[in-house]
Image (cartoon, rainbow, N blue to C red):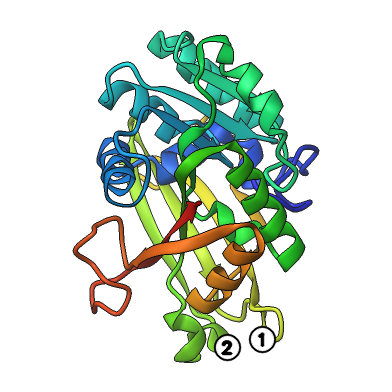
Amino acid sequence: TKAGDEAGAGAEEGSIYSHPKLYELAFGARDFDAEVKFLAQLSELHGTGPLNDLLELGAGPAWHSTACVNVIEDSIAVAVDNSPAMLARAQERIDELGLTESIAVVNGDITELDAAGIFRAAGMNTYSGGFDVACILSGTAAHLLDADAAIGCLRGAAAALSPGGIVVLELEHPYDIFDGTLMNAEGDAWDREAEGVKVLVEWGREGDYFDVARHVVDRTIAFNVVDPATGAPVAGWGPPVETTVQCRVYTAPEVDALARLAGLTVAAVYGDMNVDTPLDDEQAHNMICVLKKA
């Protein structure tokens, strides 16, 4: 799912990425149709025009690929991941939705993308060459822990784009670096009810280590599925999952420099998946960077 040993193929059983249905339960409340419409709007504003084909990197369950094909008529998508469990789940979802003619699932490391292989997987015998949009969403880019990984990912994405195409990155808002929050980690927690159960999610924990020189936090992540009424463990979901995942926090100037090294330029930066939310808005929750291929 992500670059790095803790999230790639062969990740230990305790990894959150080796439990796709639990991952879906924890993070599946997002409005993926609306997010794809936002990507389509960015393509119109900054890219090639209408969004006809999407490359989803670090795709996990392929949420954005399936939403793209459902929302945008005659579109295609390719979902790239390197977690065996996530690849299997993505293909399962695509099969269940009857979208096998429009979406390809590709096993690949997002830091070493094979653009030609991706084109072949997408049935590019009828393809004009290059994607309109490549997206790296849902925190995936945070697992690009150093410049080499980030540049490798962006160069691969750029190679797969049509001229004028865009890469869209969803990153943590950098404000936490500047106000010192990451130096005194407190973490976050929430719960979500779905499928007759409740999942308790811990995203970061007090005392999680932040490497100020590398801008990398060792983030504790835990999932626990319980009965909504009693709080007792629910059979069939397995024991609680807890792991530590390294996450890089990028600033906007860093993204600009990395994009330039990858042959891209920054076309826009937003504070959420809304073109009316600037990065410095008090309601900004994330940093959305739009990178354009010449």
Image quarter of residue 82: top right
Residue depth check, mark 1 versus mark 2: number of the one nearer the observer: 1
| Drawn side of residue 117 relative to residue 93, left or right | right
Please say if 272 is above or below 235.
below
> Residue at 49% across / 41% down in the picture?
163
Q: Secondary structure at mark 2?
A: helix
Q: Which mark is residue 183?
A: 2
Q: Residue at x 57, y 56 (%)?
A: 141
Task: Point out residue 79 in the picture as x, y percentages from the top left corner.
Answer: 55, 30
Dot 1 or dot 2: first in sequence order is: 2
Residue type of the residue flagged with mark 1 = Val
Q: Secondary structure at mark 1?
A: loop
Q: Which mark is residue 23?
A: none
Identify the image quadrant of the N terminus: top right
In the image, what residue type sits under mark 2? Met
Q: Is residue 90 above or below residue 5?
A: above
- In the displayed structure, does residue 108 sit left or right of residue 291? right
**Residue 185 x/y as whole percent:** 54, 81
Between residues 53 and 223, which one lies in front from this camera angle? 53
Left or right, residue 108 beside residue 205: right
Q: Are marks 1 and 2 in contact (CB under 8 Å)?
A: yes
Task: Specify few, some or many for label 1: CA neighbours under 10 Å numbering under 14, 14-19, or 20 or more.
Answer: few
Q: Which residue is labeled 1 in the image? A: 212
Q: Is residue 294 above or below residue 260?
A: above
Residue 81 position, x and y percent, is 64, 35
Give the residue furthest to the bottom: 179
Where residue 286 sits, quadrant-wise, is bottom left
